[in-house]
Amino acid sequence: MTETAKSSGLKACTTCAKVWPADHMYCERCGSALIDRDARGLQSVWAFWLAGLICYVPANLYPMLRTQTLFTHEESTIVGGAAELAAHGAFGIAAIIIAASVLIPVGKFLAIAFLALNLRDKKRMSQHRRHQLYEVVEFVGRWSMVDVFVVAILSSLIQLHDVASINPGPAAMAFALSVIFTMLAAQSFDSRLIWDREDEV
């Protein structure tokens, strides 16, 4: 059985990671409150996860980009825009958009749900692997905003009034909210629960 800080009568600061005896209420290094495990913490995880999933649906159904020229008006979704880029030979950019806008968000949804649902199941994945999965979710979360950044840059650079203009579609806001909610879901997940479950088995 792995020895943890909790089993040793210690408590770690979630802000600066300094370890203190369990009877300490505040961190003497940074002044933050020393918070123990929140039994209702998973409720916040699921609330943010569900909100992110709800926002992700219109983010893929509605146009992400609206392009208007002197004679044409086009609207493209995330996948449609990536397919159009690939059709014009920009396979690298299309792959980055698909990875950042489809593969990473879907992977985050699945990873967060897996961690929240399988805290007690040691047979599926070890505690070390689960913690590594959590760290990966935390790290890649920020890269999901690549598509939103591309839309923002194009919208600011290409504004030629009646000749040509690019504007964000309704999917841009929905996608940004989806990314924010999934990041909040990952941050709400207390990774210490992964190790606590090992002591309970």
Image (cartoon, rainbow, N blue to C red):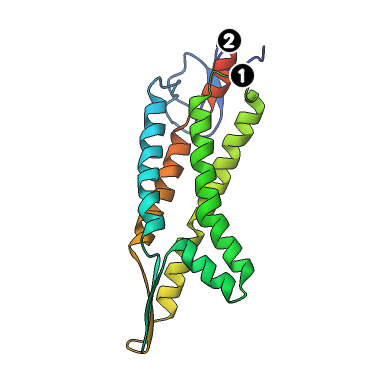
Q: Pinpoint residue 170: horizontal percent, then vertical percent.
A: 33, 62
Element on which disc 2 rests: loop
Element on which disc 1 rests: loop
Q: In which quarter of the image is residue 72?
A: bottom left
Front one among 149 and 172: 172
Judged left or right of residue 59, residue 126 is right
Front one among 115 and 88: 88
For the residues labelled 2 and 1, say whether their Cβ atoms are less than 8 Å apart: yes
Q: How crowded is mark 1: few (under 14 residues within 10 Å), some or many (20 or more)?
A: some
Q: Quadrant of the C terminus?
A: top right
Kindly identify the residue that appears in the image at 54 percent across and 49 percent down.
Answer: 104
Looking at the rendered image, the disc whose residue lies closer to the viewer, 2 or 1, is 1
How many dots with numbers?
2
Q: Pinpoint residue 171: horizontal percent, then vertical percent.
A: 37, 60
Kindly identify the residue that appears in the image at 61 percent across and 31 percent down.
Answer: 131
Residue type pointed to by label 2: Val
Res. 28 visible in picture: no
Gap in Å between the C-alphas at discs 2 and 1?
A: 9 Å
Q: Pinpoint residue 147: horizontal percent, then vertical percent.
A: 48, 62
* Disc number placed over residue 201 in the picture, else none: 2
* Disc number placed over residue 182 in the picture, else none: none
Q: Pinpoint residue 155: horizontal percent, then vertical percent.
A: 40, 74
Judged left or right of residue 159, residue 90 is right
Vertical relation: 186 (above or below) 145? above
Q: In which quarter of the image is residue 166?
A: bottom left
Residue type pointed to by label 1: Lys
* Disc number placed over residue 122 in the picture, else none: 1
Q: How crowded is mark 2: few (under 14 residues within 10 Å), some or many (20 or more)?
A: few
Earlier sequence position, callout 2 versus callout 1 = 1
Judged left or right of residue 23, residue 62 is left
Vertical relation: 91 (above or below) 22? below
Vertical relation: 177 (above or below) 120? below
